[in-house]
Structure formats: C-alpha cells, structure tokens
Amino acid sequence: MAQTTAGAIDVHTWSTPNGWKIPIMLEECGLPYRVVPVNIGKGEQMAPDFLAISPNNKIPAIVDPDGPGGAPISVFESGAILQYLGRKTGCLYPSDERARVAVDEWLFWQVGGFGPMLGQAHHFRIYAKEKIPYAVERYTEETKRLYGVLDRRLQGRDYLADDYSIADVATLTWAKFHDKQGVDVATYANVARWLETVLARPAVQRGLAAV
C-alpha cells in the first residue's frame, strides 16, 4: 500500500532488518505510507533533517501527519514505532493488558538482544575488515543461544505471543538472515516452521519489497 497520497505516513528507512519492520507493519495494518530512502551506506542518516526526527541517527523513523489529536508526530526507534502504530490502529497489538505484556516482553527481547547480537554476529562474520576469532565466536555463540530461546518459545505455539503480533514482525526480519549469522535454522525446527509461515504472509512480502 506504499503510495504518495495525502495523509500517508512518511517512513524514513533503508533495506536492513530494522528498516523493513515498519513497511511490513504498515502493510499488515493497511495504512498508506511513503518510503523516504535514507541511504546509510552514503551516511544520509547523519543529515540534519533526519537528525531532527531521529536523534540517534538510526533508521527507521516515521512522520505521521495524523498523529494524536490530529497533529503530526515523528517517532524513532523501531520498537516504539511498532507500538505506536499498534495503538493507533489496534492492529497486531492487543488491548488486553495480559496479552499486551506478552507481546511487549518478546518485542523488547528482540530490540534489546536478538537484533543487536545477531547484528554483531553478522558484522564480525562478514563485514569486519579484520577477522577477529574471539569476536566471531562470542557473537555467533550468543546468536545460537538466542535462537534456542526463540525455538523453545515457539514450542507448541504458532507465534511468539500466541497471536501474530508486532513481536513477530520485529523478529522475523532478523531471523530471515540466519545463514549470515552462522545459524542453520533447520536445527531449530520450531523457528524454521514459524519463519516459513510468517515470510509467506502477503503483507510481509510487500513490506520487504517496498524498501
């Protein structure tokens, strides 16, 4: 549903695991949006205009022209954006407090651990100019531990918080690159099943293709 119509949410993002989360969420919720590319390879995330909406110079960030009270609002940090969109629409974010706590637990598990540690494994295994065996081993082993946590959580359930939610959206974009993180996802049967299911969702496919 990416478009440039009036009222569309501007999504400042790039083609990274964090960057894909928000187009996927917007596709799932059926909200109009416009992708504003921020080429992090060229350092565009350091531009003053982007800093004004994302003080940490990180993608993604959004500008919603129809924010609370009808006034525009900018939101940065992928987890905060997912929660904001969930509250705004009621999509993929339950109103029941007990169910919401479960979603928040796994959302913060992703943004605080699963994403950063997998990102470090990816970096030191593939992009680091100097191959540092200690760093490769440390982050690869922590990545495998986290996949084990995810696999145990998915034992006997379809999604992280029972129903498909923003926690799944946040996690799937990182798990998609398991091979680059030194992980054979086939050894985590529950994760493999879940990943196949969520990646097959039409909204996920559209969101991945939008950036």
Image (spheres, rainbow, N blue to C red):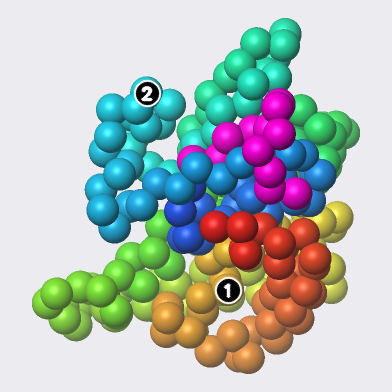
Drawn side of residue 137 relative to residue 113, left or right:
left
Relative vertical location of residue 58 with respect to residue 189 in this rendering, above or below = above
Task: Give the magenta range.
Answer: 1-12
Label 1 is placed on what type of residue? Lys
Q: Position of residue 149 (x, y in %)?
A: 60, 68
User: Circle 2 is placed at which residue position?
Assistant: 52
| In-front residue for pair 65/67 | 65
Q: Is residue 170 visible?
A: no
Q: Main secondary structure of the magenta part?
A: loop
Residue drawn at x 36%, y 73% is 122
Residue drawn at x 78%, y 74% is 200
What label sits on residue 149 in the rendered view?
none
Residue lying furthest left: 130
Residue lying furthest front: 5
Q: Secondary structure at mark 1?
A: loop
Number of other residues with Cα within 10 Å of mark 1, as a class: few under 14, some 14 to 19, many 20 or more: some
